[in-house]
Amino acid sequence: VDNNEFFFVPLSNPDGNAGSYPSRYNDNGVDLNRNFGFMWNSNPYYNPGSAPYSEPESQAIASVWQRSQPLTVGISGHGGAVLFLYPWGYKGADAYNDVEFDHLGSEYIYPRCLDPEMDTQGSVWDVLYQAPGVTGDELYGAHGAMGITFELNMTKQCPYSKSVQIWEDHIPSFTWLVEELDNGLHGMVTDASTSDPIAANIVIEGKWFTFSDAEVGDFHKYLRAGTYNYRVFADGYED
């Protein structure tokens, strides 16, 4: 915690949490986890809203990850199953960082997590179903962060005592995950003449892209140990 910044959104669907039985929909009847922009699908089957980010809750959450400072990882917590999930949800294909996602999921579950029900990891499409406009795809696809989804409880209703037990079961895994995500490709993108930071796109061969921090110039992309070729693109500069 001394070397990382953490942003917490304790509840992203207050409407759905206010009734006698939890609902995935807000008061507009929109499934907020189908309302994000990356590969949003207008099919009414998904209850996705009238447009990407049409809902105030989605807009509020997006304000966190649309800052000039890119996220390294984004984790979304859910109930209704016990799973470790990652992109893609909108299509049945491996993510470019599938090796990294698979490693994180395997190491998180088997050696460390104390919850015996946490025994399955994979893409949203492979483990569950097609799900366009979801948080993990948005974080990974649009922002280059490692988009991870935790399904943490078999029921939607989770009493406080159960929440405490879930957290205690996941402390060893979550501690390892935070430390592991510090590994990967690090760098600074600055102007050669002025040393001013530059907002840039870092494209890694065979992997999904990431961005540099426009205010500082640093970037970080979680990768497994290896040798990688990458290029840096920025408006007004040669790559």
Image (cartoon, helix red, strand yellow):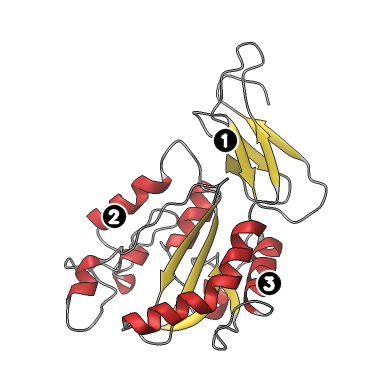
Residue reaching furthest top? Answer: 193
Label 2 to label 1, Cα distance in Å?
Answer: 28 Å
Q: Is residue 81 above or below residue 171?
A: below
Q: Position of residue 68 (x, y in %)?
A: 45, 35
Where is mark 2, residue-wise? 51
Q: What residue is rendered at 32% in x and 74% in y? A: 45
The reply to whether callout 3 and callout 1 are in contact (CB within 8 Å) is no
Residue reaching furthest front? Answer: 2
* Element carrying mark 1: loop
In the rendered structure, which amino acid carries the disc numbered 3?
A: Glu
In the rendered structure, which amino acid carries the disc numbered 1?
A: Ser
Q: Position of residue 234 (x, y in %)?
A: 58, 27
Q: What residue is rendered at 33% in x and 60% in y? A: 35
* Element carrying mark 2: loop
Where is mark 1, residue-wise? 212
Number of numbered labels in the structure image: 3
The reply to whether callout 2 and callout 1 are in contact (CB within 8 Å) is no
Q: Position of residue 1 (x, y in %)?
A: 54, 52
Q: Position of residue 73 (x, y in %)?
A: 54, 54
Q: Nearer the viewer, mark 3 or mark 1?
A: 3
* Residue nearest the observer in this picture, 93 or 59: 59
Q: What residue is rendered at 67% in x and 63% in y? A: 98
* Residue nearest the observer in this picture, 106 or 139: 106
Where is mark 3, residue-wise? 107
Asked whether, in this view, residue 125 is left or right of residue 38, the answer is right
Q: Residues within 10 Å of mark 3 (few under 14, many from 20)?
A: some
